Amino acid sequence: MTATTTSYDDLEISFHRRQGDAQWDVNIRFDAAGSDTDVRLRSEVDALDLQQLVNLELQPKEYGDHLRRALFSQPLLQRELVRAQAASEGKSHGLRIRIVTPSDDDALAKLRWELLM
C-alpha cells in the first residue's frame, strides 16, 4: 500500500493589537507549496464586534460568516484570501490557514477560528 502525501499552501494571518487601541495590525504571509518565496502583506482590522460573535455562538454558520466578513472586510486581505484559494485550487493543493494571535489577547484566543471558512 502506497502512502500519498498532500501538499499544502500556507496562508498565515497574524494579529498584533495596537497599543491602547481596539484595532489590530494584521500580517498576511502566503507560502505556496514547493516555492522558495512567500508573499507578505500588512493591513489592519477594525474592532471586531465581539458581542455579536457571542450572540451567534450557537449558530455556527452565521458565526463563521460574521467572523469572515469582519476579518476580510479590508480589500487587501480579501484579495489575498481569494488569490490564495485560487492558487491552491489551480494546483490541486490544500490550503492551510494558520491564525496567530498574541498569547495575552484573550479576546482573540476565545474566537472560534475553526468556523472561519
Image (spheres, rainbow, N blue to C red):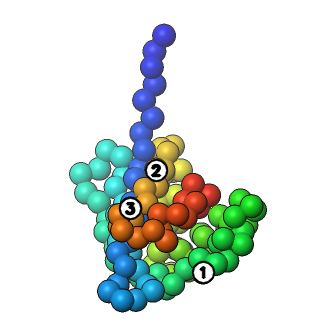
Residue beneath the point at 50% across and 66% down: 81
Residue drawn at 35 percent across, 63 percent down: 103
Disc ID at residue 20: none
Which residue is under mark 1? 49
Q: CA distance from mark 1 to mark 2?
A: 25 Å
Q: Position of residue 32 (x, y in %)?
A: 36, 52
- 97 versus 64 height, above or below: above
- What amino acid is found at the position of numbered circle 3 in the picture? Val
Residue 104, given in percent of the width and then of the height, sits at: 36, 68
Q: Secondary structure at mark 2?
A: strand
Do the residues bearing badges 1 and 3 touch, measured as CB atoms within 8 Å?
no
Answer above or below: position of 6 versus 102: above
Residues 14 and 51: in front is 51
Query: Can the viewer see residue 91 in this picture?
Result: no
The one nearer the camera, 109 or 37, is 109
Local secondary structure at mark 1:
loop
Q: Is residue 24 visible?
A: yes
Please provide percent x and percent y for residue 110: 52, 63
Contact (Cβ within 8 Å) of mark 3 with mark 2: no
Which residue ends up furthest to the bottom in the rendered image? 20
Q: Which residue is mark 3?
A: 100
Q: Residues within 10 Å of mark 1 (few under 14, many from 20)?
A: few
Amino acid type indicated by mark 2: Arg
Mark 2, residue position = 96
Left of 68 or right of it: where is 74? left
Label 2: how many residues lie within 10 Å, few (<14), some (14-19) or many (20+)? some
Q: Is residue 69 left or right of residue 109?
A: right
* Foreground label between 1 and 2: 1
